[in-house]
Amino acid sequence: MNNIFLHKLKTAVLAVMGLFIISCTKDAPTPSNEKEDKGHDDWSKVTFTIRRGHLHGDSFHANPENLLYPTQVFTFETDGTNIVRKNKDGKVLEKGEEPILMIAGGQYAMEIVYYNAKGERMNHEFTTSEMLPIHQHFFTVKEYLNTKTNQTSTETSELLSYAYRDTNPENVMVGQYIDKRNSTKRSELTNDALGLKGYFTPNVAYAKFDMRVRLLHVQRGTKYVGNNKNKGTFPFNAPSDDLLVRSGTDFDQLLPVHVLTEPSSGNDGDYERFVQDLADYFKKSTDEIKQILRESAEQQENSNYWM
């Protein structure tokens, strides 16, 4: 009789312990793997759209597209292992092939759009209150080639200027109605450096270089200097060593850039030099280039693209 009682007691205790373990397993949070749970999707495709324009104060206004000022589109695609760069026609490009074309002193807007494996736009995932403080694009250049002298220089800190122009929401042009049917609210600048939108000004003519584009994902602390938003963020071309050590990269690729020439200084003969530079590159006559420049100057306010 005692053996039967002890057997039943042991069975009951084991059953209660089993229920307790199951309950704890259901209630316990699943451990988070930071490498797998980033807070956003992995990208499958990234598009870069570059437009030539001019400024109204700090606002970028695109010029109408023409031979000298084309809208340039490049795409990076990955299968999870390999990454390729393509032009807008889908041609796979080799390193340095079809660079971004610029003219010194002009403004060039760059808009970056990320897509996940389903082909869905995912930029908004970087703009949430959790993700925005830990994401920032940086644009750095290690060295450049002077195409006139064929000399290489590592003095690149002043090669480019850049202004972050990210908006809220990210997919609506600055100043445009967010929902014009139901609201008078317009898209505004975030004033929080992310780099999905921004414009460059090349400062050095006759320069060829690879621009490294990195989207840093900060894994400890935030992107802000001293983790203090009021102190701002690090310059577009100078992430600190500390920030780099604390961060991973969600995107890290090179974009080739060629600054063809610079506009005339107004000195005698300099306009002819400028025109000849463009004629040589685009394989057009100087008269054709002059006509394009005249038409561009007359029509530069006709575009409806702003940043």
Image (cartoon, rainbow, N blue to C red):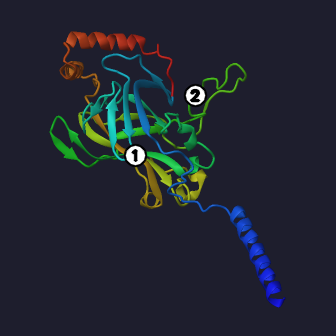
Cα–Cα span, label 1 and label 2: 30 Å
Which is nearer the eye, 24 or 185? 24
Image quarter where the N terminus lies is bottom right
Q: Residue 221's spot in the image, x, y percent?
A: 56, 59
- On screen, residue 84 versus residue 33, left or right, reads left
Residue at 40% x, 47% y: name it.
237
Question: Which is nearer the N-term, disc 1 or disc 2?
Answer: 1
Q: Quadrant of residue 228?
A: bottom right
Residue kind at label 2, given as amino acid type: Val
Residue kind at label 1, given as amino acid type: Gly
Which is nearer the eye, 221 or 288? 221
Q: What residue is disc 1 on?
A: 80
**Compared with residue 7, is residue 173 higher up or lower down, i.e. above or below?**
above
Say what secondary structure mark 1 lies in.
Answer: loop
Q: Residue 285's spot in the image, x, y percent?
A: 19, 12
Between circles 1 and 2, the one closer to the viewer is 1
**Compared with residue 4, is residue 59 higher up or lower down, i.e. above or below?**
above
Crowdedness of circle 2 by 10 Å Cα count: few (<14), some, many (20+)?
A: some
Q: Residue 172's spot in the image, x, y percent?
A: 58, 28
Q: Quadrant of residue 200?
A: top left
Crowdedness of circle 1 by 10 Å Cα count: few (<14), some, many (20+)?
A: few
Q: What residue is disc 2 on?
A: 172
Say what secondary structure mark 2 lies in.
Answer: loop
Residue found at the very far front of the displayed protein: 1
**Compared with residue 303, is residue 131 higher up or lower down, i.e. above or below?**
below
Residue at 72% x, 63% y: name it.
27
Residue at 43% x, 36% y: name it.
46
Instruction: In the rendered structure, find residue 43 and report the number of the disc placed on it.
Output: none
Residue found at the very far bottom of the displayed protein: 2
